[in-house]
Amino acid sequence: MPGWTFRVVPYGWLTALDGTQTVRGRSVKVNASFADIVEHSDTLVALMGDFEARNGPFSLMANLVWSKIGGADSGVRSRSLAPGITGTFGTSLKLDIEMAIAEFGAAYEVARFGPVAFDILGGARYWYQEADLSFAVAGAVDIGDLQVAGTRAVAHSGSVDWLDPVIGARVRYTVAPGHELLLRGDIGGFGVGSNFSWQAIGAYGFELGTYQGVAFSGVIGYRALYVDYAQGEGRRRYEFDMLQHGPVLGISARF
């Protein structure tokens, strides 16, 4: 009988944002590379990790992303207001987002052809967000429901969370001993939590060495995660229609 093996991967995701964020009915277009976020953010902290427990063809999986970032000016543009809200934004915009994404589920190997294995997977993806959108009070905009600080008006979303069911598949290819290529894709939401979401991951792992029975590997890859979530209308409108994507760098420990 095969025994359990475990893999823990702390990693960094150099995330770019591309989409629309709506807070209290005020919408902005976000198109910010990771470099833009680093340059214009006064807050940039993150915690990310991946875990898998495997026994034969069966695996339990979990992934956590927590980040707190801010973007301004070059990566954030005025877009539109929700129905019932009139006016235009000022020229200076800033968006701060605190976000947690927790994935958990299981995978099962359904086929293997030599070094290539095919898995199906299912689970859930939990989202938690708090967003603040601030803009200069320089135009004729209705700010009656917003907090005003000096020359800026701030829209606070408060806590927003939802849970998406997720189904998908992945391919694991052992290129050579200690070297593995992984491709994964999934879709979720289906109107249960978000309207729709999808994810694509490509990663390459290469063994670095073994220390006290733990095999360490470097991991490089690319991850793209899209979600379209919306709730409320008018001044209560919150929407996160966003593609997050960028390179992934990590260290894997397997035991």
Image: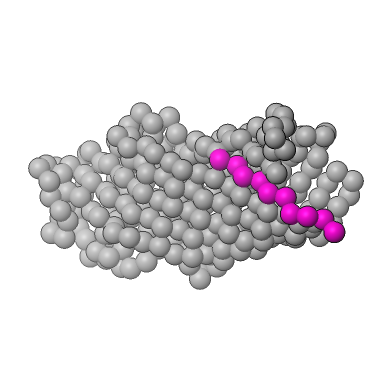
Camera sees residue 220:
yes
| Quarter location, residue 2 | bottom right
Considering the image in quadrants, where does the C terminus appear? top right
241 horizontally vs 252: left or right: left
| Quarter location, residue 175 | top right
Magenta range: 1-10
| Number of numbered discs on residues | 0
Residue at 51 percent of width and 55 percent of height: 102
Task: Return the x and y of residue 166 as percentages of the image width and height.
Answer: 60, 62
| Quarter location, residue 202 | top right
Q: Residue furthest bottom?
A: 192
Task: Return the x and y of residue 82 as percentages of the image width and height.
Answer: 29, 61
Task: Return the x and y of residue 72 as percentages of the image width and height.
Answer: 30, 37
Q: Residue furthest front?
A: 212
Above or below, comparing residue 242 to residue 206 in the picture? below
118 horizontally vs 200: left or right: right
Residue at 61 percent of width and 35 percent of height: 251
Above or below, comparing residue 130 to residue 251 in the picture? below
Residue at 82 percent of width and 34 percent of height: 177
Q: Out of 77 and 205, give the one closest to the viewer.
A: 205
48 horizontally vs 203: left or right: left
Q: Main secondary structure of the magenta part?
A: strand
Residue at 20 percent of width and 50 percent of height: 154
Q: Is residue 152 magenta?
A: no
